[in-house]
Image: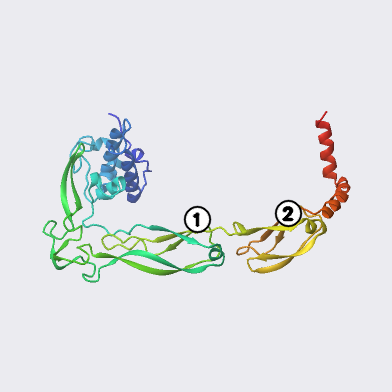
Amino acid sequence: MNKKDYYETLGVSKDASDVEIKSAYRRLAKKYHPDINKEEGAEAKFKEIQEAYDVLGDENKRRQYDQFGSAAFDQTAGYGGQGGFGGFDASGFDFGDIFDNIFGGGFGGFSSSSKARAQQGSDRLMRVRLTFEEAVFGCEKDIKLEVNDKCDDCNGKGGTGEETCSECHGSGSVTTEQRTLFGTFMSKSTCSKCGGKGKTYKTKCSTCHGTGRIISNKTITVSIPKGVDTGNRLRITGKGEPGINGGPNGDLYLEFVVEKHEYYNRDGDDIYLKVPINITEAVLGTKKEIPTLFGNVKLTIPEGTNTGDKQRIKGKGINKGDMYVIMDVRIPKKISRDQKKLFEELEDTDMDDTVIKDFDKFTERNDR
């Protein structure tokens, strides 16, 4: 007869504690449960896991196993033998915890809890438009919300004349028998009549229609921190959807959409500004007033400036960012006769430009 190593089946050492054994069983039962794992051999593996825990999860049986091995349980242990669950002694063990983990709230759609649990409400997302200046410097913003509040007329109960629920007799749940391939389960589900509260009311509240909550419009003032950008979010605690069965409200998330500025362009905390200069300023250089987020500053533009040349003004961006001034040399489309003569006189000056000379040589080679 083959010897069975229950410790190896559960993946624990022989000196494992009761907590470690129970934890290993929970993990493996979830992994190989046939309702979850459809692979070939999963059902057989699940039976082995059940058998191993039937022995190692019981102090007396574990002591016998350590002394005599699996032979001591060949007639009694195993899936399909005697015991609470097909040979598995379920006394003192909460199946609901495992099946809650496997199915996310009760085996086969049933809840193991005696009453409906309090749940936090869902979060809400709201988009808020900001001007460029509001985003840069921060501001106070009034936000209009549709809020689901507790009904004052019934104090959030949904009615008056409190009574014990006749369906669940105050327990908040009803017991359901479910037959499966692995045996019969006695499971509990939330009572549909009282919603798990265990109580009903003789008179339903006419204000909230028995829900215990009313919808109202409110305006809240929110402080927008400076430096936010499009896509950034701000969480407002407790302003989301209402909780269930007395649970707390969810949160409200404000997602910002920042309008573009007429002149400034933003890249993170840095600001870019394209500054137009005429050809004389570009050639001779000049001092020019530059508008920044914090007022005008005087910037020296060196002679011989070209379009695309960039200068940094430190600390004039957002928060600790900088401002970059991009030069845009504007070429006149119409000039007078005298102006034209001046430019013609300057034509030979371009021959001193190394870039122009190299390009002219390339043009000559390409024409051959």
**Height in image: 42 above or below 231?**
above
Q: Which of 62 and 91 is in front in this view?
A: 91
User: What residue appears at the point 38 percent right and 61 percent down from the top-left corner?
Assistant: 251
Q: Name the residue under label 2.
A: 330
| Residue 72 horizontal side relative to residue 281, left or right | left
| x then y, percent, for residue 334 | 75, 52
User: What residue appears at the point 66 percent right and 61 percent down from the top-left corner?
Assistant: 322
Task: Pick the quarter of the image with the N terminus.
Answer: top left
In this picture the colour scheme is rainbow
User: Is tag 2's residue or tag 1's residue first in the polypeptide sequence?
Assistant: 1
| Residue 276 horizontal side relative to residue 217, left or right | right
Q: How far apart are marks 2 and 1 (CA)?
A: 36 Å
Q: Name the residue under label 1.
A: 231
How dense is the environment of label 1, judged by Cα within 10 Å: few (below 14), some, or many (20 and up)? few
Number of residue marks: 2
Q: SS of the residue at dot 2?
A: strand
**Height in image: 53 above or below 219?**
above
Query: Which quadrant of the view contains residue 67?
Result: top left
**Height in image: 216 above or below 359?**
below
Query: Which quadrant of the view contains residue 4?
Result: top left
- Identify residue type, mark 2: Arg
- Identify residue type, mark 1: Gly
| Residue 239 horizontal side relative to residue 367, left or right | left
